[in-house]
Each structure stands twice: as C-alpha cells, then as structure tokens.
Image (cartoon, helix red, strand yellow):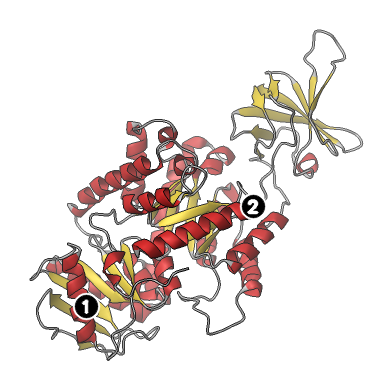
Amino acid sequence: MPEPSHDPAAAILNRRTLTRIVATIGPASESPEMVRDLIEAGVQVFRFNFSHGTLDDHSRRLSVVREVSAEVQRPIACLGDLQGPKIRVGRVTAPGIELLPGQEVVFRRGVETAFLEPPAHPEDHPRAIFGTTYEPLIDEARTGHRILINDGAVRLLAIDRSADGNDLHARVIVGGLVTSGKGINLPESELSAPAISDRDRECVAWAVENSLDYLALSFVRTPGEVLELRSLLERSAPADPRADLGNETATLPIIAKVEMPQALRNLESIIDAAEGIMVARGDLGVEMDIAAVPVAQKQIVAACNRAGKPCIVATQMLESMITSAIPTRAEATDVANAIFDGADAVMLSAETATGRHPVLVVQTMNHIGLAAEDHIASEPADENPPTRLLDSHASIAALCRGAWRIATDLHATAVVCWSERGGTARYLSQNDFRVPIVAYSSSIRSTRRMALLRGVYPVWSRPPASGSLGEWNEQVDLHLVEHGLAAPGQTIVLVAGRPLGIAKVINSIAIHRVGEPATGYRALR
C-alpha cells in the first residue's frame, strides 16, 4: 500500500453528513473507479460481507480500497462481517421446489439434494424432503415451533419428529419457492450452534493477516460469544509489539450484531464486551415480531449512546434503490429517523454490493443525512453526557465534555484534536457535537478506525518536528481554510497533549480564532 501523503489537507470533505455511511462492496462496486466515486460521494467505511464471495474476491477488493484511499488521501475503514452460524436449506435442483399451504415438509439427516416424495394418497401433495446445513435443528426444533425460510417469506410449523430421530416433520403455513441455500430461522428454538463457525475462523485469520479495521460478529446471543472472538483475535494478533496497531487495543475492534431476541435480553453486557453494535434488522425482524423491531432499534441505539459505543443501523435502509433511481418516502424517513435516534452510522447492503446505482444511493443517503442533521442543529443541544463513559474514563471523558460545552457556548465551527490511537476522537464523538471533529494521528491504522466514529474526520499526519502545539495550530488553520471548514476569524476548539504524537497524553484545551497567533493553550494539571 502506498504511504499516505504528508499533506493531510486532502483528508476532509466539505458538507459530509456527520453520521457515517457504511457501504457493502461487491460486484457492482469493486472497480477502482467505482470505489473512488463512492468515497467522493460520502462512504467512510466499506463492509466486506463474508457470507458471499471467496477470500480471493475479498483480497482483490481490499487492495482496491486501500490503493484508492491512499491515492485520494482519505482514511477509509474496512469492516469484515462474519457469516456466523447461518442455518440454510441444502442443495435444491433448479428452479427450486414450490411449497403450497398445507403441504408436508421433512428435514432429514444426510439428504444431499432435496426431492419430492410421492404421497400415500393421490389427492395429497407430495412430501418435500430437504437437507440442511445444520442437522441439529432436527433435534432442537420442537412441536409447535415456527420454521421460517428466506427471511420469513416461506413459513412452516414443526409438527412431529420421527421415531428414529432422523426426520423433523413440518406443515407449510405460508407457501413459496425454496431454492438452494435459503436461510432458515427458528425464532422459538434454543439452538446450540456455535457463534463462530469453521468458515468464520478462516475469515478471522484472513482479517488479521490483512489488517482489517473492524470485525462484525453475527447472531450474538451472549457477551461470552464476543469474548470468545476476542480470545481468537488475541491468539492471531501480530507478534511484533512495535507494529502499528493503532487505537486502544492491539486486536481488531469487534462490532456485535444484534439480530436475536437473546441478544436484546443481554444487551447491556454485550455492549460492554464489544467496541460497537450493529442493529441488524434483517434477521431481527424475522426472529421477533416485526412490529417490535422499531422499538428495539431505539432501545439499542439509546443504550449505545449511554455507553459511549458507536452504533450502526443496517438492512433495507434504501432497499428500493437496488433497482430504482429514487428511494421511497418511507425509506428516506427510515434513514432520517435512525439519525434522529442517535445512530453513529447507517449502512447499505445490496444497494451498493449488487445494485444498479451504487454512487447515487450513497449521494442520496448523504443528502438525507444532511437534512436530518440540519434539523437536529436547530434543536437544543443534548445536555446529558454518555454517563457510563464518564464512569469508566472520567478524566479524558470530562475533558472532552468540556470541549463540547465550550464549542456549544461559543458556536465553534469545528473541534480539532490530536488523537494518536483514536481514544480522544471516540470520546469526543460520543458527545452531541453538531460540527466536524477533525482528528489528527500519525498512526495509519488509527485514522482508518476513526472513520467509523460519528462526526470524526481523521487526518493522517506526522507531528511537527518541534512537537510544538503552536506549529501544529498553524497547520490546522491552513488546513481548515483550504478546505472550507472554517474562515479566518471563526472560532474553533483544540484538544491536544504536550508533546504531540504521544498516545494517551491529552492535557491541553484551547479556544482559537482561525488565522490568529496560537496563544490560548492552557495546560490541565
């Protein structure tokens, strides 16, 4: 990967939504030209969906993202999304099997290819016999449990198990076409499937080897599963302690995906165990009553805000734009409401991975985000800090809260910090800033990881040779003016440490007017 330019000025864009945009990279968006256009349109994070494509595919796409990011001099985070214990229908010969209401379905051990079994009575439907990627479902689905296929489009009810324990019998309630590999959900069943599959372990090793910036864990039920992944990551971490590990942890930060009812019951402890949360509304809407999903989303986002942890809202945000050039009014409202709730990031899936209009959909999401944030800016600022962050990191969290208070009272145009490993940027991000947080670091990986944080615009830069805050201040002024983030005479707030570039040394805060001599620093003793 080419080393970023020493000129940090190109790291920032004008009028970008403070809410981060996560885009899934796929066949429709993997070319260098498309990746460049998506970054220009507003993407700060690219998601690599391990449920689709080979590791060779992901390696090729990662190289493109890293190369384009270096060329345009903008730090971009790369998020790997583990498939998890996804239960799927086994092989079904094309064009699939059309299930009809009332038809009997059997899930049978050892079936490689689904088939239709002639009925005992000519007037009956033939029985459909399926294999599955998770044969324990035959033991774990009880009579009366729902079995949902293809995100609930096809619905079955378990009715019996054979005497030899090899067959689970079910009745079709809502019919439809079933093809190879369609997902199966069992919302009432307690499954013993491990959180991390063998395929996931291969992907974890690849993610560590290729220095991804975040790793999302699917189908989380308990904090122990997050800790299991962390242990695996720690065993896979680079041996060289001098490596550019960035942030506050040597291992990949974990984003826990909340998509199971059990995760909602353990929400607070899962948030504590992970570095961030994804509201994965696709499976969540299948696993629980769909009417409860909007309430769950608000509860999850609010809990993350209290804890000072970033939260991504995902799935079907602009779904119609997979084919359409404009979203539905409901989709635009959905994106805005996620931002009103306090989400740090909103995510696009098939819209950018396989859709017809990847760049347009990102531009649309950015436009909706800006309108929502302009409305938020007209409302009173949030006076309540993220309490659990204050409890666990009192000194630095209080300093960042002080910067918020100063910026709010003085209507500052921007907040600028030196955040060598990303901690200060994260603490600043979890306050209700309505202006950009420009975060400098000399760690390439830290700048990439900061790209997920709401409102944070990371800048890769070496500290001034003198280590002087005043010399850095001059660099900041030139940078802000050149990119239209501030005009001479406007007020900004600076948070840094003496000397610059040393991790976990934050002891100075200043009120500064752009273009004037840097005389306002006061060290906090």
Residue 266 in view here? no
Q: Residue at x 62, y 81 (%)?
A: 239
Residue for badge 1: 475
Residue for badge 2: 84
Say few, some or many: other residues with alpha carbon within 10 Å of mark 2 (under 14 / 14 to 19 / 20 or more): many
Observer-nearest residue: 388 or 14?
14
Q: CA distance from mark 1 to mark 2?
A: 46 Å
Residue 62 in view here? yes
Question: Where does the image place residue 358, in percent across and percent down from the top left?
Answer: 41, 42
- Give, as a three-letter code, the residue at label 1: Gln
N-terminal of the two: label 1 or label 2? 2
Lateral position of residue 514 relative to residue 181, left or right? left
Observer-nearest residue: 94 or 524?
94
Observer-nearest residue: 40 or 256?
40
Q: Residue at x 64, y 28 (%)?
A: 155
Say few, some or many: other residues with alpha carbon within 10 Å of mark 1 (under 14 / 14 to 19 / 20 or more): some
Question: Where does the image place residue 205, in percent across and percent down from the top left?
Answer: 65, 65
Q: Residue at x 81, y 31 (%)?
A: 160
Question: Where does the image place residue 20, in percent across and percent down from the top left?
Answer: 36, 55
Lateral position of residue 425 relative to residue 522, left or right? right
Question: Where does the image place residue 397, in percent across and percent down from the top left?
Answer: 34, 75
- Give, as a three-letter code, the residue at label 2: Gly
Observer-nearest residue: 181 or 395?
181
